Image (tube, helix red, strand yellow):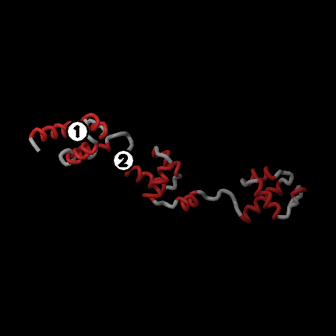
Amino acid sequence: MNSNTRSKKADINQQILQMRLNGMAYQKIADTLGVSVTVVFYAIKKMKDQHPELSNKNQTRGVKPPKQELLIAAKSLLEKNYTIKEVADTLGLSCGTICNWNKKFIKIDLHNKRNERKPILYPSGSDLRILIAKTYNENTSASLREIAAKTGVSHQAVHANLKALGVDLKNHHKPI
């Protein structure tokens, strides 16, 4: 390699360095200088030891923190029983991104977390049957939907429980 070729190469490397430090993308640098992206990539790779600011280039773009910080934040929120939607909205990401990160990196069993997070807000089983019977006896002329509204369950649940209690639903205005 003669000295003329070396000086051209050094000049191109210097231009690559300046353009990259100004925030220009690899492809744009390659197009401007009339070289391949590979030449730009390897030139920058060789210069990273002498110019450490090239290594931190992607951290200065945009306002979002690096992916690692977002992962840690997502994991923390999921551990605090936030929903996928709440985490996504908080971090400004999509629900799909949070789901994918959970599958690949975080690995929290959201199905069990969901069951822990949502306590049963209405009675079930025999407690429900007692509540429906009590509500029915207070007002025997109430409709199934009115009883359902008072007990916090569906009218189908009221119907099934009154039927199980032996109430004649066609003529259901007698107390149990």
In the displayed structure, 50 sits above or below 137; it is above
In the displayed structure, 20 sits above or below 169; it is above
Q: Is residue 140 visible?
A: yes
**Apparent side of residue 176 relative to residue 85 in the rendered image (left or right):** right
Q: Nearer the viewer, residue 107 or 131?
A: 107
Q: Is residue 52 visible?
A: no
Residue 79: percent from the left, percent from the top? 48, 57
Q: Nearer the viewer, residue 95 or 157?
A: 95
Which secondary structure lies at badge 2?
loop
Name which residue lies at 19% across and 38% down.
Answer: 12
Name which residue lies at 61% across and 58% down.
Answer: 119
From the image, which quarter does the N terminus lie in? top left
Q: Amino acid at mark 1?
A: Ile
Which residue bears the numbered disc 1? 16
Q: Residues within 10 Å of mark 1 (few under 14, many from 20)?
A: many
Name which residue lies at 72% across and 64% down.
Answer: 125
